[in-house]
């Protein structure tokens, strides 16, 4: 796979090629995704739920994302690396957004950033893009605003809400975003947004009409069992594989089966003799 860039991602909409995006938080996983042909690796603030034990993404800090983003970048994936700007790391001011987005690229090794929201955030997106940092937008359900939205609820169910989401998407496109994530909206709403834009849309819980799809890797592999939304399809049950492997290992250790001779280092007869004083060392 040739290295993906924001330019190539935009071209995929023009040629009708679906975009594949998944999350990763470490180097080995990033390499697997890249080798598997994934177009975009999102170092998401979902790391808070998936790895760090938080109940939401809100406690995730900029340092957390930069740490995991740097690990992903060290794998040198051919996938485009997008770093997720966490809660309140960009909304205070344009200056704050520029400084923190720059750190995501300079220290984290990201090649683009994802910024949630629209409205006044659009001006911030414009400033970040003007500085030379590519931005992926994010509308619909924005997890960093769950308290304002009243929880994880489907957005864009009414004509007014749908028209507002289309308006937000167009504003983000005009601000320079190279793509937009649409989360938790009816497929009809996502279709209207996608058709209104020249830039790609990437859906999560937004039906089949987007230009691409994203899932949290830990969810689709069955590693994070607590999250079971309707839109999630599990492609594996890795947690069961791990449990079975750990149970087998534990049983073998307790019964003295592991390690066996195959998994141990043995001395040669001469080395053993020297150790126990039965063989004299050869003279040089």
Image (spheres, helix red, strand yellow):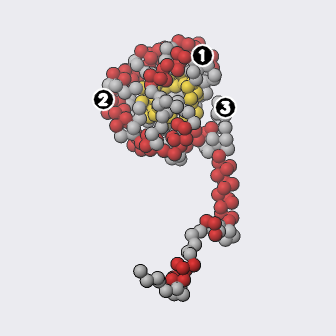
Residue situated in front as seen by the camera: 121 or 41: 41
Viewer-side label of 1, 3: 1
Q: Quadrant of residue 91?
A: top left
Q: Position of residue 194 (x, y in %)?
A: 55, 16
**Total number of numbered discs in the rendering:** 3
Residue 105 shown left or right of residue 190 in the figure: left
Q: Position of residue 258 (x, y in %)?
A: 65, 67
Q: Quadrant of residue 162?
A: top right
Residue assigned mark 1? 191
Characterize the local packing of mark 1: few (<14), some (14-19) or many (20 or more) Cα atoms within 10 angstroms.
some
Q: CA distance from mark 3 to mark 2?
A: 39 Å
Upstream in sequence: badge 3 or badge 2: 2
- As helix, strand or loop, the secondary structure at mark 2 comes to helix
- Asked if disc 1 and disc 3 are in contact, CB closer than 8 Å, the reply is no
Question: Quick check: 61 above or below 195?
Answer: below
Q: CA distance from mark 2 to mark 1?
A: 35 Å
Upstream in sequence: badge 1 or badge 3: 1
Q: Quadrant of the C terminus?
A: bottom left
Characterize the local packing of mark 3: few (<14), some (14-19) or many (20 or more) Cα atoms within 10 angstroms.
few
Question: Quick check: 216 above or below 189?
Answer: below
Q: Residue at x 44, y 17 (%)?
A: 173
Residue assigned mark 3? 230
């Amino acid at each position: 796979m040739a290295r993906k860039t924001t330019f190539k991602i935009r071209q995929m909409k023009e040629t009708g090629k679906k975009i594949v995006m998944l999350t990763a938080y470490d180097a080995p996983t990033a390499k697997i995704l890249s080798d598997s042909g994934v177009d975009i690796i999102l170092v998401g603030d979902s790391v808070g739920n998936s790895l760090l034990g938080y109940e939401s993404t809100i406690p995730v800090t900029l340092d957390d994302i930069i740490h995991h983003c740097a690990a992903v970048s060290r794998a040198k994936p051919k996938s485009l690396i997008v770093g997720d700007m966490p809660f309140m790391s960009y909304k205070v001011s344009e200056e704050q957004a520029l400084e923190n987005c720059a750190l995501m690229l300079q220290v984290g090794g990201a090649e683009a950033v994802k910024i949630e929201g629209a409205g006044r955030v659009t001006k911030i997106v414009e400033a970040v893009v003007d500085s030379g940092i590519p931005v992926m937008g994010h509308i619909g359900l924005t997890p960093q605003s769950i308290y304002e939205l009243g929880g994880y609820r489907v957005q864009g169910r009414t004509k007014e809400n749908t028209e507002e989401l289309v308006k937000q998407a167009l504003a983000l496109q005009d601000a320079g975003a190279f793509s937009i994530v649409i989360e938790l909206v009816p497929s009809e709403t996502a279709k209207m947004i996608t058709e209104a834009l020249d830039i790609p849309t990437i859906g999560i819980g937004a039906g089949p009409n987007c230009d691409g799809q994203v899932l949290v890797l830990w969810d689709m592999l069955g590693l994070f069992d607590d999250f079971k939304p309707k839109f999630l399809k599990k492609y594996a049950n890795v947690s069961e594989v791990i449990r079975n492997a750990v149970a087998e290992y534990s049983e073998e250790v307790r019964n003295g089966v592991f390690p066996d001779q195959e998994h141990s280092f043995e001395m040669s007869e001469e080395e053993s003799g020297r150790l126990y004083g039965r063989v004299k060392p050869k003279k040089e």
